[in-house]
Amino acid sequence: MRNRLLIVGIALVAIPELAEAANPLCSSLPDPIVVAGSSAVGPFIKEMGKTLVGQASPTTLIYQKQGSCTGVAAIINDTTPTAACANGACITGTATYYDATGTALSCDLDPTGTHVDVGVSDVYADTCTGLPLPASVQQFSGPIQAMLFIAPKASQQVAITAEEAYFVFGFGAAGQAMPWTTETQLFVRNALSGTQQMIAHEVAVPAGRWKGVDKGGSQAVVDAVSGSASAENTLGIVSSDFYDAHRDTLKSLAFQAYHQHGAFYPDSTATSFDKRNVRDGHYTAWGALQLLTHITTGTQTPATAASKRFVDWVTGNTGTSGTAAPFNITDVAITANTIPPCAMHVTRASQGGAIAKFTPANECSAYYETKVAH
């Protein structure tokens, strides 16, 4: 008994020494730029962040992922961006940043709230708010990505139509759209998610009325779908960048939009990575990343040095009026499994709007296709 007591005593002394160190304050990290919103854009932020932090004069991207519409609200609601936080505007808690190897680390935001420099959304701001932007806020477009219907690799399903998706996510079990009639096997997001908002426009089910289990984030949807023991009736939604990184456990379903006469993968085949059907308009569930930030009165220039640098880097405005970047944004977009705008042949002006022919100023389709797997 005396020996047991001695061992317990030693363990009690040792416990404080094993405690993990507290997260650093986000504001204490080198040259922080605060970005919040879409979880689907995570791989793109990671690629930028690991390069920026590895420079001789490092910049740290501070990223909090809560959903596209949360990123929109963080900017629009912040009516005092250079003063104390307005109600419901600033972010709190923890955020993610990346080291030079791309390892995700955590930092603590100011407990009284941290202003967001740039809100990132997979959908246009008015998709979230139903309102035009305030005069003090501007949105800029970045790389393009598709949103997909995904199933476990073992599933025998190969395609889904907009009509089927309407009954699956609009009515659940009552929709009787076989084999996706088990609502606990439908892994979705919520009305704040750009992924769900984008697909909602394609299948005509309002984003806040979807049947299924809200997994709260892109990676959680991936994990739920890939880990399902019921392959045939499992269905999820996720961005193409997350899917492309998990093709070993997932398959994407070809999608037939309303008024189409066939289903299309986002890529030219089920196994390629060329996003050719997105780039030429055959695959319809896609959109450009939207960057929201405050602007200088009477201009379309981001109001702070931090927000201007980020917007310039993402939009490729690195010339005389822009900010030099330590990377080629086209390469960053490709590495993150998104589509640089210079590789697109179509465009659209609103969420789910008409697709029109597009000729980029600096065409890079050939370069893009040499960099992706076929």
Image (cartoon, rainbow, N blue to C red):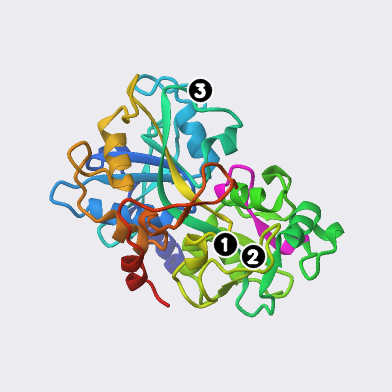
What type is the residue that disc 1 sits on?
Tyr
Give the SS element for disc 2: strand
Can residue 145 be seen? Answer: yes
Q: Which residue is mark 2?
A: 255
Q: CA distance from mark 3 to mark 2?
A: 41 Å
| 363 left or right, relative to 236 | left
| 14 left or right, relative to 169 | left
The residue at 28%/56% (across/down) is 50
Dots 1, 2 in contact, CB < 8 A: yes
* Comes first in the chain, label 3 or label 2: 3
Give the SS element for disc 3: loop
Across and down, in percent, residue 132 comes to: 54, 27
Which span of residues is magenta-colored?
A: 183-194
The residue at 38%/71% (across/down) is 372
Across and down, in percent, residue 360 comes to: 36, 52
Across and down, in percent, residue 198 comes to: 59, 49
The C terminus: image quadrant? bottom left
- Depth check: give the residue in front, 255 or 90: 255
| 195 left or right, relative to 313 | right
What type is the residue that disc 3 sits on?
Asn
Q: Which residue is mark 1?
A: 283
Q: Which residue ends up furthest to the left in the rendered image? A: 56
Q: Is residue 101 above or below residue 152?
A: above
